[in-house]
Amino acid sequence: MTKRIWPAIIQGGMGVAVSNWSLARAVSLVGQLGVVSGTSIDTVLMRRLQDGDPTGQMRRALAACPWPTLAEQVLKRFYLPHGRQPSQSYARLPLWTLDPNRWRTTLAVLGGFAEVWLAKAGHAGVVGINLLSKVALPNLAVIYGAMQAGVDVVLMGAGIPRDIPEALDRLSRHEPAMIRSEVVGMPAGEAPWIRFNPQEYDTGSTVALKRPAFFPIIAANSLATLMAKKSKGSIEGFVVEGPTAGGHNAPPRGIKQYDELGQPVYTARDMVDLDALARMGYPFWLAGGYGSASGLESAWAKGATGIQVGSLFAYCRESGLDSGLKRQVMQSLREGPVFVRTDPLASPTGFPFKVVEVEHTLSEPETYRQRQRICDLGYLREGFLDDRGRVRFRCAAEPIRDYVRKGGQLADTYGRKCLCNGLLSAAGLAQLQASGTEPAIVTSGDSLQEVRALIPADGTDYSARDVVEYLLRSAVAPQSGPVDPMPESSRRCEA
């Protein structure tokens, strides 16, 4: 069997709607793996429609979906032709549960379809979707929608996605699929299942869907071994994410230590043994601190197929990061260093989370203190058993009284930030609460300073193509192994 040649560059699946369809399409058009973020995609679709879908792309994608009746129902309920009024909040839906609201599931399926369909429209490049194990409840619905649009790769981190390979097999055959939920205090093998039945979204077709490749995002050799040996379906590669990567980082192993700024300290124990990983025979990409031509060469020298890059793409013109935040960060970068802090408390998941110190965002202490706690999205809630043995949900960033009433520890609420609302705000989809507009939170990897090399002298923006050319310009591919960094046909493509 011919060994598949994968792209050298994976564009990271960033935040909520930062890695949008426009960015993924632009990266795919130049021969690399463009990736859309599937996190909160149900809310993203709904809010874009409520903002009037000014470019018409959401309606274009929904018109192409295999569920015209559902698309029509969604448009009738959520589409506002002239957009919301300045004083109007976005609609709110019941939070995800093990028995989810029908609208939520439908929006997740259609959101996954629309984002991938738009990213793949008009070209033959590869497109992936990135999801978080910690945001488990919507994942099967989102994946099924993405598979209907022909997604090529599913990437998943922030947990142990052991059940996903088998779920991909089953979803490709339109069969019911399930993954284990996580419930505090319950052994993993006893936790209840999250179930999704594609037959409820029957298109009338009996033709199997393309089964996408699966790339778990790992931070330890033990997880790679577990996924390779214990998963019931196939795995096609790994993304190795180090502690300098943006977003969620794996917690340090062993005794927790912190530096003078309160950041977790990582040691040699937290590094993946790349030689051992290479011996497993899977292609792998290195993420976190490799966003340069020298970083790509270093990855190749270590046996990697290539690199995953986030921060450089986050600030290009095609990304979904709010344009005002892009300008603010790039202006700060022109004037000097911009601090990226590994906050051990920010995320309700308990995982360290990278935050960019930007004025008037949730990473600023005063803005954080002034924000009224509310949990109206709930993607990062944890499951727990109440006193009647029922699975309920709580979030360390919700109102403190509510969290403690549900059995949570008061200490776990300190410093926790509402990433759900903060990341949607960073993508220009901020909710209007009774207390005001939700502030943004911006995440980037430690290599954010590398963005300076791409900012034009006149202070304008740069493109996803510029990022790819910057990474490949002086990188010398290894002499062994099937690497084709940028096919000639892709060099001639125009995004």
Image: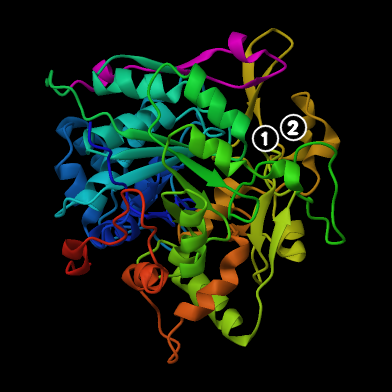
Real-space Cα distance between discs 1 and 2? 7 Å
Q: Residue furthest bottom?
A: 458
Give the residue at mark 1.
395
User: Above or below — where is 455 with respect to 476?
Assistant: below
Compare residues 461 and 3 and report the one nearer the observer. 3
Q: Position of residue 144 (x, y in %)?
A: 31, 29
Q: Could you say which quadrant of the image residue 470 lies in? A: bottom left
| Mark 1 or mark 2: whose residue is earlier in sequence | 1
Residue at point 47%, 62% (across, down):
297
User: Above or below — where is 238 with respect to 338?
Assistant: above
Q: Contact (CB < 8 A) between labels 1 and 2?
A: yes
Give the residue at mark 2.
403
- Could you say which disc has been placed on residue 214 in the image? none
Would residue 221 appear left or right of 230 to someone viewing this image? right
Point out the image quarter for the N terminus.
top left
Is 292 included in the stretch rendered in magenta? no
Q: Position of residue 198 (x, y in %)?
A: 28, 20
Q: Could one spot residue 160 in this view of the protein? A: no
Would residue 463 appear left or right of 315 to someone viewing this image? left
Magenta highlight range = 179-202
Residue at point 32%, 53% (across, down):
483
Dot 1: element: loop
Task: Name the amino acid type tagged 1.
Answer: Cys
Q: Count residues near mark 2 (Cα–Cα under 10 Å), then give few for <14, some for 14-19, many for 20+.
A: some
